[in-house]
Amino acid sequence: MVRRLPTVIAVAVVAGALAACSGPNPATHFCEDYGEAVGKLYVDAANYEAAPAEFSATAAAAMDDLSRLRAPDDQLRRALDSARFALTVFSEDASLADFLSRTDFAQDDVVKSCAEHGVELKPAAG
């Protein structure tokens, strides 16, 4: 029994490591949260002229949500920093809405990085 103990421990450690490695994609939660926060912003930007107050509320909520997001790796962290910068350079909601309405959601840095991590994001339904 004493000789088998190290073997049993080694098997348990390997099994635990395999279970941890086969867990869910750590980028999934981050990407889905980003998609929810920013996807609606893109949709509302296209409707800015008809509903500027709704866009402003969505933009404020998106920025709050983005401030709480934590990327699980360096690639997603760099993409998130780039996206945050792009969303904060506009001093007026009308300018941000104009920029987003002319921008392809699929070209968003985080959306592209999430796709590389196996998570496909689409703009929220309008």
Image (tube, rainbow, N blue to C red):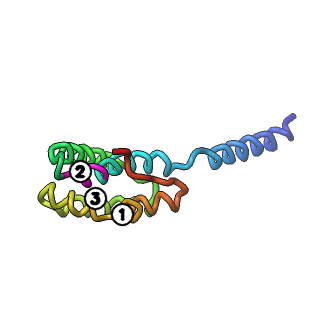
Residue 41, percent from left and from top: 28, 50
- Residue pushed farthest top? 1
Give the secondary structure at mark 2. loop
The three-letter amino acid code for the residue at tag 3 is: Arg
Tell me what residue is drawn at x 58 percent, y 45 percent. 24
Q: CA distance from mark 2 to mark 3?
A: 21 Å
Q: Which mark is residue 84?
A: 3
Please report contact status of discs 1 and 3: CB closer than 8 Å, yes or no: no
User: How far apart are labels 1 and 2 at the CA level?
Assistant: 15 Å
Left or right side of 125 for 90: left
Secondary structure found at label 3: helix
In whole angstroms, how far apart are the C-alphas of marks 1 and 3? 16 Å
Q: Position of residue 124 (x, y in %)?
A: 37, 47
Nearest to viewer (mark 1 / mark 3): 1
Q: Is residue 46 magenta?
A: yes
Q: Name the amino acid type tagged 1.
A: Asp
1 or 2: tag closer to the N-terminus: 2
Residue 81: x percent and y percent?
32, 61
Please tell me which residue lies in front, 85 or 12.
Answer: 85
Judging by the rendered image, the residue that carries numbered circle 1 is: 104
Name the N-terminal-most of marks 2 and 3: 2
Badge 1 marks a residue whose secondary structure is: loop
Query: Amino acid under label 2?
Result: Asn
Q: Which residues are magenta?
A: 43-48
Residue to which mark 2 is pinned: 47
Residue 46 in view (yes/no): yes
Please say whether residue 25 is one of the residues in the magenta stretch.
no
Dominant SS type (magenta)? helix
